Image (cartoon, rainbow, N blue to C red):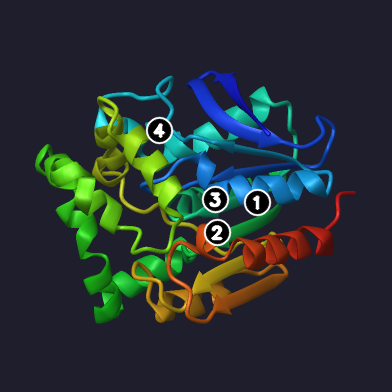
Amino acid sequence: MEQIRIPTSQGVFDALTAGPAGGRPVLLLHGFPQTGAMWRRQVEALAARGFRAVAPDQRGYSPGVRPEDPAAYGAEFLVGDVFAIADALEWPVFDLVGHDWGGAVAWWAAGARPGRLRTLTVVSTPHPGAFTHALRTDEEQKKRSRYMLDWQETPATEERMLADGARLLRSLFGGSVPPERVEEYVRHLSEPGALTAALNWYRSGSGVPTMGAVGLPTLYVWGTEDIAFARSTAEDTAGRVTGPYRFEALAGVSHWVPEEVPEETNRLLLDHLAAHPAD
């Protein structure tokens, strides 16, 4: 496993990678408030099976791609980064995996350029159509998503999250992520400008892009104790995928699935990739 830098037309992304250079390529996208390191156990497992896994620190998290304007964190830029990274790695087709915000970007990327993707795996985050429908019709989802509006306050949000030794930021993980990894994320987001850049994903003002059904082979994994996404959004996702679809609801598991239950995540991901082999 190694840290690399990926120069692209958008800037230079830091990334964690492992596996043979010629292995089947898998790109893994993290969410808030994490980095590509959240996928460490999955990168290891993929590499052991001969895949080439790359987990970048996304826009705002990589110092080399950290614009100040919140509008630069709109969906079109985030999706553009996915394919800019793939182009820089010379991956014409690849498997895409995402969690939390990275899951949203993965859905959008699948909707925008499905021909570039072999399979899609999303953890926690429902299909954007299911999410926007729930925001209109499901009081439980509205309640769970209220934080998104609160976090648009700046610099008040940053000050609250980093006060008292980043007590609030640490609390977001609810004890479900290994302490050493939480410390790594807190150190990263405590760097000047880093937390503001990460929160700019919530402040871009671009809203949720509309998109239709996804025709790719899709694995969707959701924990029944997820604090961000209600069961209604998870279950509604099935009707928004027309390709081969597998939904796994993990009982008693929280939002932080890949780090809370890494072995189960690895098993599901590897099974999904094996079920849809490269041509």
Residue 128 or 59: which is nearer the viewer? 59
Find out whether the residues at labels 4 and 2 contact each other: C-beta distance under 8 Å.
Answer: no
Of label 4 and label 2, which has the lower sequence position? Answer: 4
Q: Amino acid at mark 3?
A: Ala
Q: Is 223 on the left or on the right of 21, as rendered?
A: left
Q: CA distance from mark 3 to mark 1?
A: 17 Å
Position of the N terminus by quadrant:
top right
Of label 4 and label 3, which has the lower sequence position? Answer: 4
Q: CA distance from mark 1 to mark 4?
A: 20 Å
Answer few, some or many: residues within 10 Å of disc 3's Cα (few below 14, many 20 plus, some between 14 and 19).
Answer: many
Q: Which residue is mark 3?
A: 106
Of label 1 and label 4, which has the lower sequence position? Answer: 1
Answer few, some or many: residues within 10 Å of disc 1's Cα (few below 14, many 20 plus, some between 14 and 19).
Answer: many
Q: Which residue is mark 1?
A: 42
Residue 3: x percent and y percent? 60, 27
Q: Is 14 on the left or on the right of 164, as rendered?
A: right
Of label 3 and label 2, which has the lower sequence position? Answer: 3
Q: Which residue is mark 2?
A: 258
Q: Amino acid at mark 4?
A: Tyr
Q: Nearer the viewer, mark 4 or mark 3?
A: 4
Find out whether the residues at labels 2 and 1 contact each other: C-beta distance under 8 Å.
Answer: yes
Q: Which residue is mark 4?
A: 61
Q: Amino acid at mark 2?
A: Pro
Q: Is 23 on the left or on the right of 115, as rendered?
A: right
Answer few, some or many: residues within 10 Å of disc 4's Cα (few below 14, many 20 plus, some between 14 and 19).
Answer: many
